[in-house]
Image: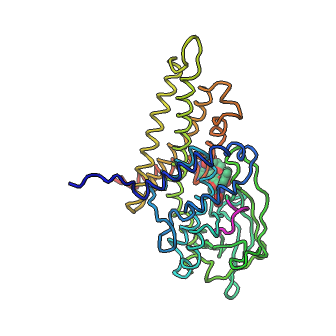
């Protein structure tokens, strides 16, 4: 039998270097950048150097080709320090995976190396003012004229739409199609000329939306007015009518990612609470000795562990292939609700200090609710889980 190697695996080595970067570079600046809602440009550059913009892109196009399991561990670790940073890479990778999964060979060769290096960074443009959960209600259209598409419409709540360079944009190529999803396509829509970097006409980034939490990272509006893009490079897969499936097929991994963010944030809330409960003394003893606090810590620790296991389970199932919307939905639902609950309990354990802008608890408390909304609300997760449950157990 071979003795276990003392060398860390490549995945472990990546995690270790990310951990060192978080401790050294992110922790000292996260609170200030977050409170002032400043885009973390220097940290984004670091993430580029760490290869994170290519984390899930196949090595043949210059990515790291990591498994969902390792990716989830990375996302959880970053979220322990500052969840906003995970939005910069995750939205980008959701866009890249649409091309990797459904693009033509020419599209993969053109876009993926630029996405993997972070030279072109972007996100996913699905939501509109009147279309969030009901994605098929979008109104943005793309009309084919010769070898181009002409895009008109507006998107809302789009992460990376201001600082990023390109979006995977869900559009209607046939607004009259029934059922509605048959008229939907995804276009890769750069905001800049890829060769020169000059802004392209017809795309108008709007406001950076003010948010309760998840600050620093840009979430904005964006409008397209007679914006033109070449059909061969931009229509994902080269065939109209596939967009709804292309856009939503990435959501399983997106949900595992949101669940991993929940794990990281809940872990941080627990860690801070365990430490503070031993430091803070009332009635002659550490508050960790009071049963009221012990009940909270016991509940939090159990739910954090359950969240970790649900995320590992969903990521492993994803890596093995096949449909995992039930597993991803369960992980997302439980881990995000746990993050919200753990942040609230951490605030109670910290008393007045938890309410202070000088401690990290208030940030967790403001960031956590987003996890219950993004990548499909938790109401929808319950419905998805139930539907799958019935479908897998038909009588
Ligand atoms: C900070 C932030 C970043 C975001 N980033 C992006 C991004 O990068 N790209 C992007 O495309 N979008 C993004 N979004 C949008 C996000 O995906 C949507 O907000 C989300 O899908 C919910 O849609 P909605 O806000 O329109 O809510 P609605 O769809 O209006 O839902 C409102 C409520 O009704 C419930 N509901 C709706 N339909 C049903 C139903 N059929 N059955 C039961 N309950 C239902 C919902 O669960 C919710 O409780 C972001 C949002 C935020 C807040």
Whether 161 is among the magenta residues is yes
Whole-percent x and y of residue 140? 71, 69
Query: Position of 288 compared to 128: left or right?
Result: left
Whole-percent x and y of residue 388? 43, 54
> Going 68% across and 25% down the picture, which residue do you hit?
352
Residue 219 in view (yes/no): yes
Please say if 187 is above or below 305. below
Whole-percent x and y of residue 161? 70, 62
Considering every residue shown, the one lying at the far left of the view is 1
Q: Quadrant of residue 193?
A: bottom right
Residue 168 in view (yes/no): no
Considering every residue shown, the one lying at the far front of the view is 6
Considering every residue shown, the one lying at the far top of the view is 283
Question: Bounds of the magenta span?
Answer: 160-170
Whole-percent x and y of residue 390? 41, 52
Whether 12 is among the magenta residues is no
Q: Quadrant of residue 207?
A: bottom right
Query: Position of 77 compared to 321: left or right?
Result: right
> Going 46% across and 58% down the picture, which residue do you hit?
68
> Going 55% across and 72% down the picture, which residue do you hit?
99
Query: Nearest the camera: 174 or 79?
Result: 79
Please say if 149 is above or below 45. below
Position of the N terminus, as image quadrant, is bottom left
The total of numbered circles placed on residues is: 0
Query: Nearest the camera: 127 or 292?
Result: 292
Query: Nearest the camera: 186 or 340?
Result: 340
Query: Position of 137 compared to 100: left or right?
Result: right
């Amino acid at each position: 039998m071979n003795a276990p190697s003392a060398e860390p695996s490549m995945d472990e080595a990546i995690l270790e270097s990310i951990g060192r970067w978080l401790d050294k570079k992110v922790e000292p600046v996260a609170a200030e950048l977050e409170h002032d809602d400043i885009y973390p440009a220097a940290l984004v550059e670091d993430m580029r150097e760490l290869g994170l913009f290519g984390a899930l892109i196949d090595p043949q196009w210059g990515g790291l080709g990591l498994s969902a399991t390792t990716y989830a561990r990375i996302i959880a670790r970053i979220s322990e320090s500052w969840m906003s940073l995970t939005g910069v890479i995750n939205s980008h990778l959701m866009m890249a995976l649409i091309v990797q999964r459904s693009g033509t060979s020419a599209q993969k060769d053109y876009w993926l190396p630029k996405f993997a290096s972070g030279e072109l960074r972007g996100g996913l443009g699905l939501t509109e003012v009147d279309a969030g959960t009901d994605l098929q209600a979008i109104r943005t259209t793309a009309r084919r004229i010769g070898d181009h598409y002409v895009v008109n419409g507006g998107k809302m709540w789009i992460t990376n739409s201001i600082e990023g360079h390109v979006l995977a944009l869900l559009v209607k190529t046939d607004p009259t199609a029934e059922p509605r999803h048959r008229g939907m396509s995804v276009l890769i829509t750069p905001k800049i000329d890829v060769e020169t970097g000059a802004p392209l006409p017809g795309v108008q980034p709007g406001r950076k939306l003010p948010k309760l939490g998840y600050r620093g990272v840009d979430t904005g509006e964006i409008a397209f007015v007679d914006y033109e893009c070449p059909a061969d490079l931009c229509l994902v897969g080269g065939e109209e009518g596939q967009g709804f499936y292309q856009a939503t097929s990435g959501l399983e991994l997106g949900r595992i990612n949101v669940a991993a963010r929940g794990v990281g944030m809940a872990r941080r809330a627990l860690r801070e609470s365990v430490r503070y409960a031993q430091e803070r003394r009332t009635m002659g003893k550490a508050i960790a000795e009071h049963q009221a606090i012990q009940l909270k810590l016991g509940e939090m620790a159990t739910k954090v562990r359950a969240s970790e296991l649900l995320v590992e389970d969903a990521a492993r199932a994803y890596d093995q292939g096949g449909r995992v919307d039930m597993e991803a939905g369960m992980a997302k639902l439980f881990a995000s609700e746990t993050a919200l609950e753990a942040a609230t309990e951490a605030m109670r354990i910290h008393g007045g200090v938890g309410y202070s802008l000088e401690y990290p608890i208030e940030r967790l408390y403001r960031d956590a609710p987003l996890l219950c909304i993004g990548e499909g609300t938790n109401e929808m997760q319950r419905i998805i889980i139930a539907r799958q449950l019935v479908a897998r157990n038909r009588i």
